[in-house]
Amino acid sequence: AMAALAYPDRIGLRRKGEQPRYVLSGGKGAALPEGDALAAQRLIVATDLDGDAREARIRMAAAVTEDEIRALFPTRIQAAELVEWSRRENRILARRQERLGALVLADRALDDPDPQALARAAFEGLRANGLTWTPRAARLRARIALIPDLGPVDDDSLLADPDWLLPYLGKVRTLADLRGLDLAEALKARIGWDGQRRLDQAAPAHFVTPLGRKVPIDYDHETPSVELKLQELFGLARHPMVGNRPLRITMLSPGGKPVAVTTDLPGFWAGGYCDVRKDMRGRYPRHPWPENPAEADPTTRAKPRGT
């Protein structure tokens, strides 16, 4: 025990493994010769070292117990709660440790880690593994990106600022939990109520058809786009806009195949529709193909058989 008082930075804790290698309380590594009488000792004091900078060779040592160390250094043993993301295990590790310098004298699972510490550890897991985008969250991000003053939404910018996401990470413990996150609600909170109002005006999530059906708008490409059956657009005389840009409409046959694409619906009704009508009437005789689609009633139904 007196040796520990004389050399407080040379108290050694045996590393895992068969070789008698130790980490010293001062942070250095050291090793006993194989076959040394103290080679199996958990704790030692290295009283004589050879001075090697990487891993010193212990020329002389004395055994010491943990009880003796705790009695000698009660104020130097520090307790700490560690809540961190393990890249090796891809999950949060929550531990309570007692340390003397570089030595971990005690290490046990922490039953009730601080929720904020858990959230911060989960965010470090996101930084290590990247953000996962559900289709819903990806559509929302693409919309927000169209309004620059709502803030950048590229991955690097989002991972540089944890505050927007921490409130949504309380239940995350594993990589599977991270991959299951839907970031949409957090993105909404990030831009606030006013930002959501502006977003709905400038880049709405849906196009409402003449029948009142909501069709999701695809913002993944340069031009906002929708796909829907041609008959559902009947009666629409003006082309729908997203902000100040025309919506790109892919019109589908009753069988769900693309038959035309336009950003000028009045022009299509007056021109290209005539060719589509000629081609489709014979294939889908139970569906309406009016001569004046801009004034016809929209529908998603076919005529009853035999009529």
Image (cartoon, grey):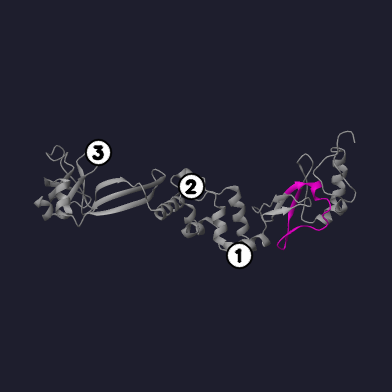
Which mark is in front, 3 or 2? 2
Residue 275 is a magenta residue: no
Q: Residue furthest top?
A: 306
Distance between the alpha carbons at the discs numbered 2 and 1: 28 Å
Q: Which mark is residue 60?
A: none
Residue 242 is a magenta residue: yes
In the image, taking residue 267 as reference, residue 106 lies left or right, namely: left
- For mark 3, what is the residue? 17
Picture layout, residue 287 above or below residue 270: above
Please state which of residues 169 and 284 is positioned toward the viewer in this rendering: 169
- Judged from the image, the secondary structure of the residue bearing numbered disc 3 is loop
Residue in the image at 73% along x and 48% along y: 227
Going by the numbered disc 3, the residue's amino acid type is Gly
Q: Which mark is residue 194?
A: 1
Give the mark, 2 or 1, whose residue is nearer the N terminus: 2
Give the mark, 3 or 1, whose residue is nearer the N terminus: 3
Distance between the alpha carbons at the discs numbered 3 and 1: 60 Å
In the image, taking residue 103 as reference, residue 232 lies left or right, namely: right
Which mark is in front, 2 or 1? 1
Give the mark, 3 or 2, whose residue is nearer the N terminus: 3
Q: Residues within 10 Å of mark 1 (few under 14, many from 20)?
A: few
Going by the numbered disc 2, the residue's amino acid type is Leu
- For mark 2, what is the residue? 178
- Segment tinted magenta in the rendering: 227-250
Q: Residue 247, position in %: x, y?
A: 73, 56
Q: Residue 37, position in %: x, y?
A: 11, 39
Which quadrant holds the C terminus?
top right
Residue in the image at 33% along x and 51% along y: 82
Distance between the alpha carbons at the discs numbered 3 and 2: 34 Å
Q: Residue furthest front?
A: 112
